[in-house]
Amino acid sequence: MVKMRIIETNEGIQDELTVESFDIFAREMRDKGWNGVSEMITSGIMGGDILELGPGPGYVGLELTKKISVTSLTGCEISPAMLSIAQKNASEYNFPAQYVLGSCMEMPFENESFDTVISNGSLHEWENPLEAFQEIHRVLRHGGRFCITDLRRDVNPLKKALVYYVTRPKEMRRGLLTSLNAAYTVSEIIELLRHSDLRNAIVTRNFFGLCIAGEK
Ligand SMILES: C[S@@+](CC[C@H](N)C(=O)[O-])C[C@H]1O[C@@H](n2cnc3c(N)ncnc32)[C@H](O)[C@@H]1O
């Protein structure tokens, strides 16, 4: 039986030291190709004006700018400390990304502003994912695509142990476990989507997580 969800936080990662460790961790994930980028491309996202939800240090969207045709990249992030690290990383990538302080449950954007909405590793932190799904639908243009990747709570314990021991820096390991406990299962997400306007989304299971993809 799958354990009950244990909610993690509604404030994102705020503390500056933790943010610096998370930056190192996210860089490793990028270098290993474990940050959802290839799944996002496989899911059919086209680029154009991209909105990234919970970009953290920003590597997911920034990597996409190297692989698909991106007109603009905007990040919506709840943590001011993450915003400044993402801005610094965007200048390393030499891409004029814009990071905005805000919550994905109340996005500070006009209706139909984006061609693509993406997010990796953030969904399990959203206080009300249904509200976020509605917001994704609102800010997407018609025909626009979304792809949300995240951890999965019902991941096999062996895989969990494997990924735990390869997680670096070590101080990120505890956070990996709390994030896994807060993550959703595929069936929970399918049930949530049934109540949203993203009804046609396809939810798939992968090695360590899940992927929600579709078109408006
Ligand atoms: C585990 S990190 C993942 C960061 C990045 N997407 C990656 O894959 O490396 C989750 C991020 O989501 C942000 N976050 C959490 N809740 C949020 C919300 N309601 N709105 C926007 N960002 C949020 C956190 O501050 C944090 O930066």
Image (spheres, helix red, strand yellow):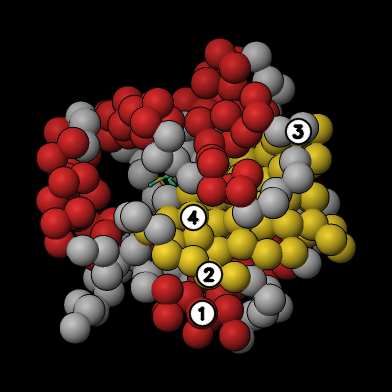
Mark 3 and mark 2: span between their CA atoms? 25 Å
Image position, residue 32 (x, y; %)? 37, 31
Tell whether label 2 touches label 4 (CB within 8 Å): no
Q: Is residue 152 visible?
A: yes
Vertical order, 161 against 166 (above or below)? below
Dot 3 or dot 4, earlier in sequence: 3
Image position, residue 206 (x, y; %)? 40, 58
- As drawn, the label of residue 149 is 4
Dot 4 or dot 1, earlier in sequence: 4
Kind of residue sitting beneath label 1: Ile
Mark 2 and mark 1: span between their CA atoms? 7 Å
Dot 2 or dot 1, earlier in sequence: 1
Please tell me whether mark 1 sits on a helix, a strand or a loop: helix
Residue appearing at x 61%, y 48% in the figure? 42
Mark 4 and mark 1: span between their CA atoms? 14 Å
Mark 4 and mark 2: span between their CA atoms? 10 Å
Left or right side of 203 for 179: left
Task: Write down the residue under mark 3.
Answer: 70
- As drawn, the label of residue 15 is none
Q: Nearer the viewer, residue 10 or 129?
A: 129
Image position, residue 36 (x, y; %)? 49, 45
Q: Is residue 107 visible?
A: no
Task: Write down the residue under mark 1.
Answer: 190
Dot 3 or dot 1, earlier in sequence: 3
Task: Write down the residue under mark 2.
Answer: 203
Kind of residue sitting beneath label 3: Val
Q: Is mark 3 within 8 Å of ligand 1?
A: no
Vertical order, 143 against 162 (above or below)? below
Tell whether label 1 touches label 2 (CB within 8 Å): yes
Tell whether label 1 touches label 3 (CB within 8 Å): no
Q: Is mark 4 within 8 Å of ligand 1?
A: no
Vertical order, 197 against 74 (above or below)? below
